[in-house]
Amino acid sequence: MDKNSKSDEHKIAAELTHLAGSGTISSKYLSLLRHFYEEVRDALAQANRPLQPFYDQFSQFLHLIKLQMQTPYQFEPYHQKIRKPIDYYRFGLNFIRSLIDIPHSSVLGLEIAAQIETQMQNGENVILFANHQTETDPQAISILLEQTHPHLAENIIYVAGERVVTDPLAIPFSMGCDLLCIYSKRYIDQPIELKAKKQIHNKHTMGRMSRLLKDGGKAIYVAPSGGRDRRNAHGIIEVALFDPSSIEMFYLMARKAKTPTHFYPLTLATYELLPPPETIQLELGEARMAKFSPIHLSFSPEFDMEIFPGSEESDKNTRRKNRALAIWKIVNQEHQKLIAL
């Protein structure tokens, strides 16, 4: 370690100590923050990546967390990325970029991404039914598309769960995204006394989404699984199954908006960057692991929501299950392709 690196290490240590002494962060989150810092630093060091940019970015991260702790940010049902006076979008990209092995990363289906951009520019909507692997998938997608399709990269609206807008370590990244904030079925009963309030919030979010779809020209990313992919008992990353009711809801909302809307399967392979905990945690605050890694993205052709394998079934519930399974199979097949790259 050179003299500058030692100096930067001391600076980060001093900032963490100051943050702890200020009383603005709990001991639990301070511990998680130190762990995250060490994870990213060690991942970059093992990959022989320059550490100076990371030290600068982590120092900014600590500053943004301090601001958040002093004045907690309240996310509206529809949150639009904050670019001034602090560009949270650019912060998120620069922070995550340091962990991405760009030369070995890839995007499949760029011609489909171009088609999506054209549809948006024509005032039509696009719904991306995707898998979800890391907290920073929005930043990963933007980084992969920023050179070839910058308009799409900056204008995807992400359907976001409670955790990314309430966890202090996730909030600075979330503030740089366009989000439709919703409580997923997995967490809406936790705690039970807030269930009614969460349901009202979801109703407001759905109303805002309906107006966005009516306006047109929107691209909305949704993970119909309601959570992140995880490794199975054999250590293999599995694409979580898609919820038929989630897909049906977006389809019905799009039809109600009466603005032409297109549906595309989207596949991510970002797992290694920031793997989720091995098991689902109900309590907020998870330890982040990190690795310098390539990431991959695949756009699949437009999906026909009326004609698909199993669409001939007369029972509507069976038909919805078949639709969700058909979309999931496309994403799962593409995921197998991506992880083999």
Image (spheres, grey):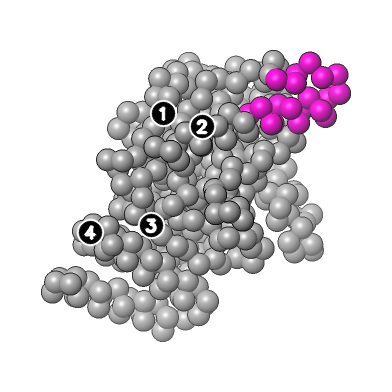
Residue linked to disc 3: 291
Q: From where the camera sits, is residue 120 visible? A: no
Q: Residue at x 51, y 32 (%)?
A: 334
Q: Residue at x 48, y 28 (%)?
A: 299
Mark 3–mark 2 Cα distance, whole angstroms, equals 22 Å
- Label 1 crowding class (10 Å Cα cut-off): few <14, some 14-19, many 20+? some
Residue linked to disc 4: 48
Q: Describe the element under mark 2 as helix, strand or loop.
A: helix
* Between 113 and 57, the one nearer to me in the picture: 113
Q: Amino acid at mark 3?
A: Lys
* Between 66 and 320, the one nearer to me in the picture: 320
Q: Which residues are magenta?
A: 309-327
Mark 4–mark 2 Cα distance, whole angstroms, equals 31 Å
Marks 1/2 in contact by CB < 8 Å: the verdict is: yes
Residue linked to disc 2: 334
- Label 3 crowding class (10 Å Cα cut-off): few <14, some 14-19, many 20+? many
Q: Which residue appears farthest toward the bottom when viewing the image? A: 21
Instruction: Answer left or right for 77 relative to 114.
Output: right
- Say which label, 1 or 3, has the lower sequence index: 1
Q: Amino acid at mark 2?
A: Glu
Q: From where the camera sits, is residue 33 visible? A: yes
Q: Is residue 199 above or below residue 209?
A: below
Q: Amino acid at mark 4?
A: Asn
Marks 4/2 in contact by CB < 8 Å: the verdict is: no
- By secondary structure, the bulk of the magenta-drawn segment is best described as helix
